Image (cartoon, rainbow, N blue to C red):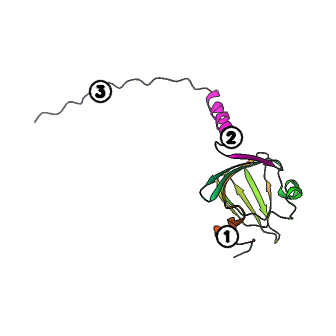
């Protein structure tokens, strides 16, 4: 039996693309612009320096909340709301930035994007660092904690 001869194949040359530093920078800028672009079909509100965009999805609301760098609930929202703590439950996805949540019992929880967030009612909160925090949130207005099986206020289990 004769030995098989190896077959030589011609491999096409790959096109060379000049790499530039501008391309990644343009993508970052485009991503940032998209991240903060207006949400189609959402109602926009501003309160205490916080930008809220709210849309309906069945019986729930879907919100994009942009907390500015330096935001602290007890400083920026307390005068508008009139309560010592935020009494709303927050459930969602921290898309960018970092936040710190403080409860009256001394418990502190920090979230850093990308991360799932579940915050019990009765808290103070602040943005950590010099970048805004963007939270995509699902809520049922005043019934969020109850409808999502959360405690009415923070407690240790």
Question: Picture quarter containing residue 119?
Answer: bottom right
54 vs 91, nearest the viewer: 54
Residue in the image at 65% along x and 30% along y:
26
Mark before the other along the chain sequence, 2 or 1: 2
Image quarter where the C terminus lies is: bottom right
Quickly name the residue at label 3.
Answer: 9
Q: Is residue 86 left or right of residue 137?
A: right
Residue 146 disc label: 1
Q: Position of residue 146 (x, y in %)?
A: 67, 70
Mark before the other along the chain sequence, 3 or 2: 3
Dot 2 falls on a residue whose secondary structure is: loop
76 vs 52, nearest the viewer: 52
Q: Residue furthest left?
A: 1
Q: Label 3 vs label 1: CA separation?
A: 68 Å
In the rendered structure, which segment of residues is drawn in magenta?
Answer: 18-47
Q: Position of residue 90 (x, y in %)?
A: 70, 61
Q: Label 3 vs label 2: CA separation?
A: 53 Å
Residue 114 disc label: none
Quickly name the residue at label 2.
Answer: 38
Q: Please tell me how crowded label 2 is: few (under 14), some (14-19), or many (20+) other residues with Cα within 10 Å.
A: few
Residue in the image at 16% along x and 34% along y:
3
Q: Position of residue 96 (x, y in %)?
A: 69, 48
């Amino acid at each position: 039996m004769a030995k098989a001869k190896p077959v030589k194949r011609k491999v096409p040359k790959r096109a060379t693309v000049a790499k530039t530093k501008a391309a990644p920078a343009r993508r970052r800028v485009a991503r940032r612009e998209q991240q903060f672009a207006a949400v189609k079909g959402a109602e926009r509100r501003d309160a205490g320096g916080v930008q809220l965009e709210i849309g309906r999805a069945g019986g729930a609301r879907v919100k994009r909340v942009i907390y500015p760098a330096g935001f602290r609930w007890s400083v920026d929202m307390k005068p508008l709301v009139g309560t010592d703590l935020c009494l709303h439950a927050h459930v969602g996805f921290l898309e960018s930035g970092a936040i710190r949540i403080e409860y009256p019992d001394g418990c502190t929880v920090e979230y850093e994007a990308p991360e799932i967030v579940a915050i019990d009612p009765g808290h103070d909160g602040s943005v950590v660092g010099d970048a805004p925090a963007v939270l995509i949130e699902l809520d049922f207005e005043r019934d969020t904690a109850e409808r999502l099986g959360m405690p009415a206020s923070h407690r240790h289990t």
